[in-house]
Image (spheres, grey):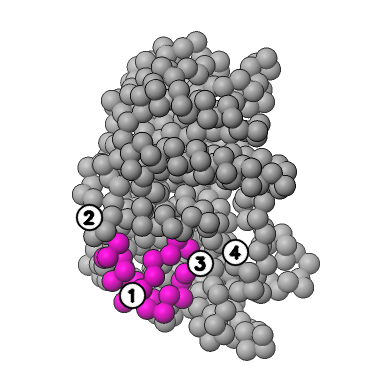
Amino acid sequence: MQELSTTLSQVKGRVVWPADPDFDEVRRPFFGGWDRTPAVIVRAADAEDVATVIAAARATGLPLAVRSGGHSFHCLVDDGIVLDLHDMRDIDIDVQNRTAWVQAGLTAAEYTTAAEAHGLVTGFGDTGSVGLGGLVTGGGLGYLIRAFGLTIDDLLAAEVVTADGERLLTDAENHPELFWGIRGGGGNFGVVTRMKLRLHELGTVYGGLLILPTTPELVAEYMRLSLEASELLSSIVNVMPAPPIPMVPQELWGQMVTAAMLVYAGDPDDGEKAIAPFRALGEPLADMVGPMPYSAVYMMEEPDYHPTALSRTTFLDELDADKAEQIIARLRTSTSPMPACQLRPLGGAMARVPADATAFAHRDRKILATAAVVYEDPAEEETHRAWAVDFGDMLRGWSGGGSYVNFLYDDEMDRIHEAYPPATWERLVRVKQKYDPENLFKANANIPPR
């Protein structure tokens, strides 16, 4: 430990030890219900600090975890070093060229707010507090996926600190295999400290929350309409018990509903026409869809909200009424007040990128489906885990599986191969062998070297 302390004394950022009074606050991840205690947390100030922490991990042999926003189940490690990018949050927007250089600790909501001031946007996921370092390198599937593609499709360059402490600028011309790998391969090859992202012109969007009653036919028709709709329309829908929120009548709380967040990335008048068929599916229980700033898709999050959740995710190629009926029936068997099946219609711009252009290769899949459950009592973990696993297995059985690396839990690393087809996997292994042959970066959805 003395060697570790000596090495980390060179760090310009903050070094947080277990004896420090705010250690528990600093280490707390977004999700509750799991607890790991690292030997030290280092909040790096810059790429040089990142290289120093990597050197410390190599010298001591301690496990190393990398953390951006704290949403990943790989962002903490027991008795090891957590490299926390929280304080690396600079953003430099080039309005004329519609690009931005951004540090990896910035959150999706912070980036979106800064870009929106210039009428510009980059698509990320569905939660504003997610750190960009982890989100972008895994793929990025959110409310602009059909209009603009995955986040990695807008990644133009990146600064990566590799396992040997070298700082590399990687793009299509410089270290192209590494650039290919970090676009979907996660944090396996180094620590991405800065990224250059493409921005799209987008002012007001037509979108918001639409809550409909749930029937198997409605859910199936919603998905059909979504996949056939204008590519400017993306949405994320949750089939779930109605939450106790003010915009839903109290007598409907707990009843099964179809809650959709829709975003039309074009003229609001055209957006109203595009969303009309969805409103017509059933009498809306709540309709908050209208012109709004894109940043409003990231709903307000309580700082102290740390949900305990479990989920299993897979890709589907279709969802008919029979399958929707099975989903609804499975949701009714949960003993949690908040089970859900989240459905993300894909296609559009995402599907037009060649499958081998990035490490994310599921370009032709139609739907990303997630069986999820939120609960409060830790004693119920095994019950809810078994429910989520069984539900996930049912979904996987419909189309042969496939996984999204950013949604893999730390207890399902046997599914890592589902995230990458064989040719993609072999190419990722070669990139890993070159840039991290000793597998220093293994506290992640790991791709081991040969």
Helix, strand or loop under label 2: loop
Q: Residue at x 26, y 58 (%)?
A: 422
Q: CA distance from mark 2 to mark 1?
A: 21 Å
Which of disc 4 and disc 2 is earlier in sequence? 4
Q: CA distance from mark 2 to mark 4?
A: 31 Å
Helix, strand or loop under label 4: loop
Q: Are marks 2 and 4 in contact (CB under 8 Å)?
A: no
Eyeballing the image, is 194 above or below 242?
below
Helix, strand or loop under label 1: loop
Structural crowding at the residue carrying mark 1, measured as other residues with C-alpha within 10 Å and reported as few (<14), some (14–19) or many (≥20) = few
Type of amino acid under label 1: Arg
Q: Dot 4 corresponds to which residue? A: 76
Q: Dot 1 corresponds to which residue? A: 450
The residue range painted magenta reads 425-450
Eyeballing the image, is 423 above or below 323?
below
Q: Dot 3 corresponds to which residue? A: 443
Q: Position of residue 359 (x, y in %)?
A: 30, 57
Structural crowding at the residue carrying mark 2, measured as other residues with C-alpha within 10 Å and reported as few (<14), some (14–19) or many (≥20) = few
Residue 429 among those drawn in magenta:
yes
Q: Nearer the viewer, mark 1 or mark 4?
A: 1
Q: Position of residue 68 (x, y in %)?
A: 53, 60
Task: Find residue 273 and report its image quarter.
Answer: top left
Q: CA distance from mark 3 to mark 2?
A: 25 Å
Task: Find residue 81 and report its image quarter.
Answer: bottom right
Depth check, front residue: 305 or 10: 305
189 on left or right of 65: left
Which of disc 3 and disc 1 is earlier in sequence? 3
Assign the C terminus to one quadrant of the image.
bottom left
Q: Dot 2 corresponds to which residue? A: 356
Q: CA distance from mark 1 to mark 4?
A: 25 Å
